[in-house]
Image (cartoon, rainbow, N blue to C red):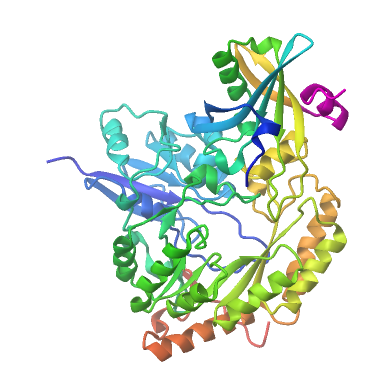
Amino acid sequence: MAKRIRMKIIYPRWEKLKGQTTFNLPPHGPVVFAAALPERVDVSFTDENVETIDFDEGCDLVAISMMLSTQVKRGWAIAAKYRKKGIKVIFGGISAMLHAEETIEHADAVFLGEAEGRMEELISDWEKGKLKKVYNYMGQYPPIETVGPARRDLYKRELYNHKGVQMVDLFHASRGCRFNCYPCAVAYLGGRVFRPRPFDKVIEEMAQIDNNRLFIVDNSLAQDKEWEMQLFKEIIPLKKKWISHTIEDDPKILDLAAQAGAWYVYQAVFDTSDYIKERIKRYHDYGIGVEGTVLLGLDNQSEDDMRRLIDFLLEIDLDLAEFTILTPFPHTKAYDDLMRKGRITDYNWDHYNAGQVVYKPAQVTPEKLQELYEYAWDSFYKDESQELKMTKLFTRVMKREMEDGTWKPRDRNLMHKSFGKEVVRTLGNN
Amino acid sequence: MEIQRDKHFDEIFEFKGKWEVPSKCGLRILNRRGIPIVIATELYQHNPGSSVTYAGGLLLQQICEAKGLNVDNVMYIECNPDTKSRLSFYQEEYFHVTFENKDGKLSNPTYKKLTDDQIRDLIFNEK
């Protein structure tokens, strides 16, 4: 019988943006990776954003899964502790791919690419004491039907709960993206070819998730109209409620999305045009909420443009807004353009949180851009706090759940806990 | 988005990008005043792998190997056409790129943006 292997998967912590909600969602990458491991690997999972790493817990092998650039330095520090103990550390995930050259210096092995069908090789090499420094599967995509279902059984569910309300579960119905957006590295990471998962696998996995609320994290659902319509038709019977990125701007598709449980979408707001105003209205016409994602610091934005954009958001009835500063992540066109012109001023990846200026903006000073960013958060949530706006969105989804019989009351045992910590209650409105 | 083939390149050059990712760029090689001018054009959506900029010296080395050129004796130009997307705000740009040649490995690129006059002269031979 093959010897069992104890693997500890760690998801390093990072600092949230100043204005961002403090909600911690169960991370998707580590549990998708875990699903690709051979059966003889016993896995434990630690998300450092909601719990402390027990460095004394016994394990044979550590896997550090990283999504954000702001996780990489912490990931390297965690690896150093384990390597000092003589435990081998492998790295994988989006930011391991974006920062591969540097990560190699801190790892026993770095896995680049998608894990499905490739983990037997890595584990066998480790068993033989022949771990390679790099497992390079960049640009070589495994058959899409081999993806999933993710190992959500690894989550400590009570840690992803705020005052009895369970956080959404992350889910993906496809990989790859046909778009080539200026600040995005997805084309480098997952390829420019849209790769939908088979519908039966999608529905099977979605139905298994013990959570009525999901975040469909696909880069954009607006990749292929026929696929998108079929996806929504297949989802309808599950009665799930979900958040996603952009949905195709087509009445038939929006109607199907609403029937399929679309709760709210992340929609980029990049100018003050009537098109944007109408786009938001059309989502609302179908009962779909909108969180505007607003990028500040593009080369075509003057101070006036940014102020106008921020003011415009208040006019278009957005349900929520999230502001970010242009950040030149490696393998994006933004990085290439700014790097060629010598405009990147800061390569400390801890600062690549999209809330800090790490380059020379074209039309304003870095200080002014930082100020406008703070102004954006403050002015959007001045009259109605983020918590209140979020509560309104929650109320909306609860009503829909009550109508279709899927509503579950909050877990009273966790009413006094927020992400595993005791809730400190204060009197009054403070 | 289509990049005008006639204007930008004579052939599609396939190369191995970062981590050997299969990648493509537009390629035109001109000869001006006895010096080969290598122009690599970014293809954006039509490039499945590393960008011309990110591949940098790796790309120039592969072009020179494939075309029998000496890396120390070419003028290397990167062309980044306008993406013409809704978020695009850069005009088409050409950069003269030089590298440090350390033991045959080209690294530390330096970029010098070409002026309109230089583009007309060097690339379109219009002077």
Range of residues picked out in magenta: B111-127
Q: Position of residue B91 (x, y in %)?
A: 78, 43
Query: In which quadrant is the C terminus of chain A drawn?
Result: bottom right
Residue A98 is left or right of residue A17, and the answer is left
Question: Which residue is at a point 84% across and 53% down the rendered structure image?
Answer: A367
Q: Position of residue A211 (x, y in %)?
A: 37, 73
How many numbered badges does the structure rendering display? Answer: 0
**In the rendered view of the protein, which quadrant contains the N terminus of chain A?**
top left
- Single out the residue that lies furthest toward the bottom: A403
Q: Is residue A342 above or below residue A149?
A: above
Q: Any magenta on residue B113?
A: yes
The foreground one among A21 and A283 is: A283
In the drawing, does residue A397 fall left or right of residue A120?
right
Q: Position of residue A308 (x, y in %)?
A: 82, 68
Give me the residue at 76% from left, 39% from top: B92
Please state the horizontal and vertical placement of residue A327, each as a whole percent of the image: 68, 49
Q: Nearer the viewer, residue A238 or A192?
A: A192
Q: Is residue B68 magenta?
A: no
Q: Is residue A120 above or below residue A56?
A: above
**Is residue A61 among what the camera can see?**
yes
Query: Where is B91 relative to A158, above or below?
Result: above
